[in-house]
Amino acid sequence: MFRATRTLLQYKIFLPDMPITLIGAQSATEVSPARATFRVLPKMTKHEVKEYLTKIYDLPVKKVNTANYMGKYKRALGKRKIIYYKYRDFKKAFVTFDSSFTDVGRGVTPERIDYDDINKEE
């Protein structure tokens, strides 16, 4: 029985349970590389963010900067008492991509349709 459990432990697969939310992105210009801002868990390190984006999404990450934010304190007025609560703490990860990555894919704007030209043709 113990031998079977030992062999099963060798085939563990790491599936990340750390959510990463994209907040904003900038495409590369002639002067600056492409950048993206993510909201991550406070326990994630720069190395984990870089590995997460590189291994799962296959993105060429050059540098990661992080900043910790404290959740805001709020106050709600009830009928009989005041309720105090706090939002969760979070961390922002500012990711700079490699020079080979130019477009962050925020979407393509469709071509403008000039309805006056269409009406004239008919």
Image: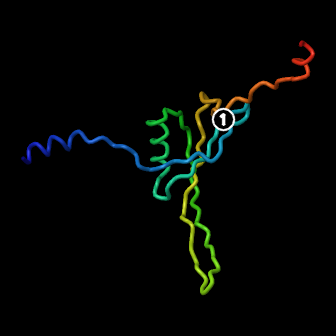
Q: Position of residue 21 (x, y in %)?
A: 55, 48
How many discs appear?
1
- Between 85 and 66, the one lying in front of the other is 85
- Location of residue 8 by image quarter: top left
Secondary structure beneath dot 1 equals loop
- Quadrant the C terminus occupies: top right
Task: Pinpoint residue 82: horizontal percent, then vertical percent.
Answer: 61, 83
- Which residue corresponds to the image point at 20% horizontal and 44% vertical from the top-left? 9
Relative to the observer, which residue lies in front, 96 or 76? 76
User: Where in the figure is residue 89, as x and y percent of width and height?
Assistant: 54, 64
Residue 30 image position (x, y, % from top left): 73, 30
Asked if residue 5 lies left or right of residue 115, the reply is: left
Q: Residue at x 57, y 60 (%)?
A: 68
In the figure, is residue 109 to the left or right of 16?
right
Which residue sits furthest left? 1
Q: Which residue is mark 1?
A: 106
Furthest-front residue in this view: 122
Q: Residues within 10 Å of mark 1 (few under 14, many from 20)?
A: few
Q: Is residue 102 above or below residue 39?
A: above
Which residue is the extreme one toward the bottom?
A: 80
Q: Does residue 5 appear to the left or right of 91 in the view shown?
A: left
Residue 111 image-quadrant placement: top right
Q: Is residue 74 above or below residue 69?
A: below
Q: Amino acid at mark 1?
A: Arg
Q: Residue at x 65, y 36 (%)?
A: 34
Q: Nearer the viewer, residue 57 or 112?
A: 112
